Amino acid sequence: MKKKQVTVIIGMVAFFAMTFVFSTAAFAKLYVFGGGPAGGTFQVVANGIQVYKPVKGLKGIKVKAQTSAGSVENLRKTDAGKQQFSTVYSGHVWLGRNGKMKNDAKKYANVMAVSWLYGAPAQMVVRKGSGIKSVKDLAGKKVGVGNAGSGAFANCELFFSHMGVWDKIERNAMGYNDAAAAFGNNQLDAFWLFTAFPSGAVIMAAQTNDIALLDLNADAEAAGFYKEYPYFGKLSVPAGTYRGVDYDAPSFQDSALWVANAKVPADVVYKLLTLVYSDEGLKHMHGQKKTFKHMSLETGATNIVTPFHPGAEKFWKEKGMLK
C-alpha cells in the first residue's frame, strides 16, 4: 500500500512539474521580429537573433522571426504594434517619423531605433556598352526596381522621382534574383538593388553578361538629392567587386536599422542588446552573413538620425557610445 502511495505521489509531482514547465513556456511573451523576403538580408537579421541560443533561453520572452515584403511594410507593422521588432532602413524611419513617406502623410512616431546593423548601398546594373551612363538615360528602358513594398522599391521610386525618370521607365517590380535572371534573358535593360555588396544577384548577372555599374553619386550630387534627404551617405562599390567592373563605382547608401515599437518594455530591448552585442553574440551574427561584419559596439549607435528606444538609449549610454 505504501509503495502504491509513493508511486502515486511521484506521478503527481512529475505531472505538476511538467505542467509548470509547459505553462511557463506557454505564457512567454511573444515578440515578433519582422525581417524581409525569404533569403534576403533583412530576414537573415531576424532569423539570426531568433536562433541565438541565449536569446532562445530568455525566460518569459520568445522572439519569432517573421517574413515580410521589406522595409516599408516593417515600418508600418512596427508602428501599429503588429511587429514588436523589425529591420527598417534609416531613411524610412526618418521619412515616416516626419510624415514624408510617398503618398502617405501619416507620422510613424512609434518606431524607435535600437541599433545600426549595416550599410545598404544603391547599385544600378546595366550592360557594358549599352550607352547608359546616367539614370536619366534609362528613360524608355525596361528596369527592375525591386519588390513592391520593399525598401529597394521605395528608394528606387524616391531617387528616380527626384531625377525625373520614375514615370519614364518601364517598371518591373521583382526581387533581385528574378531581376538578374530577366536581365540575363534580355528581358530587362537594367536593374536596381539596394543591398550590401557583393550581391549574389549581381554576381549572377555578371556570369551571363558583361555588366557595368552606374555612377549614382554623380547623379545624386547634380540633382541636390543629399540636401533633400540628409540620411543618405556617400560610398563607392570597390573595383573588382564584380567580374568585369574594374573601376570604383560611386554611389550612396542608407543604413539598415534594428527598430522596436515604442511600447516594448525598455528592459526587453536592453536584455536583447546585451546578448546580441556581447562578444559571443557578435560572433554569432558575423557568422550569419558577411554583410554583418561591421556590427560592433563602436558602430551600433552610429548613422542614426531618429530617436532611440529608451532601452537602447540606456544600453548605448552605459557602453559610452551615447552622451
Image: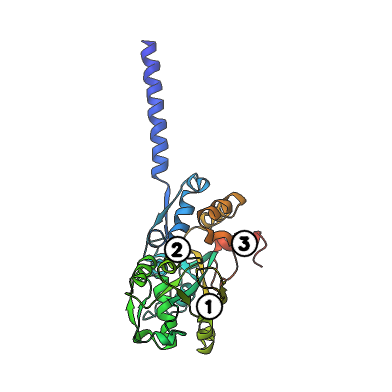
Q: Residue at x 35, y 83 (%)?
A: 141
- Residue furthest top as drawn: 1
Q: Which mark is residue 251?
A: 1
Quick one: SS at disc 3? Answer: helix
In the picture provided, is 175 more to the left or to the right than 299?
left
> Can you see residue 142?
yes
Residue marked by disc 3: 316
Q: Which amino acid does the dot numbered 3 rest on?
A: Trp
Which amino acid is tagged 2?
A: Gly
Query: Circle 2 — which element?
Result: helix
| Residue type of the residue flagged with mark 1 | Ser
Contact? badges 2 and 1 (CB < 8 Å): no
**Measured Cα–Cα span from mark 1 to mark 3:** 30 Å
- The disc placed on residue 200 is 2
Q: Is residue 172 left or right of residue 30?
A: left
The residue lying at 43 percent from left, 66 percent from top is 207
Q: Secondary structure at mark 1?
A: strand
Cα distance between the residues tagged 2 and 1: 18 Å
Which mark sits nearer the N-terminus, 2 or 3? 2
Q: In the image, residue 259 lies at what x, y percent?
A: 49, 64
Figure check: 6 above or below 269: above
- Closest to the observer, 278 or 239: 239
Q: Quadrant of residue 295?
A: bottom right
Q: Pointer 2: residues within 10 angstroms few (<14), some, or many (20+)? A: some
Along the line of sight, which residue is nearer the eye, 290 or 238? 238
Q: Visible in this render: residue 97?
A: no
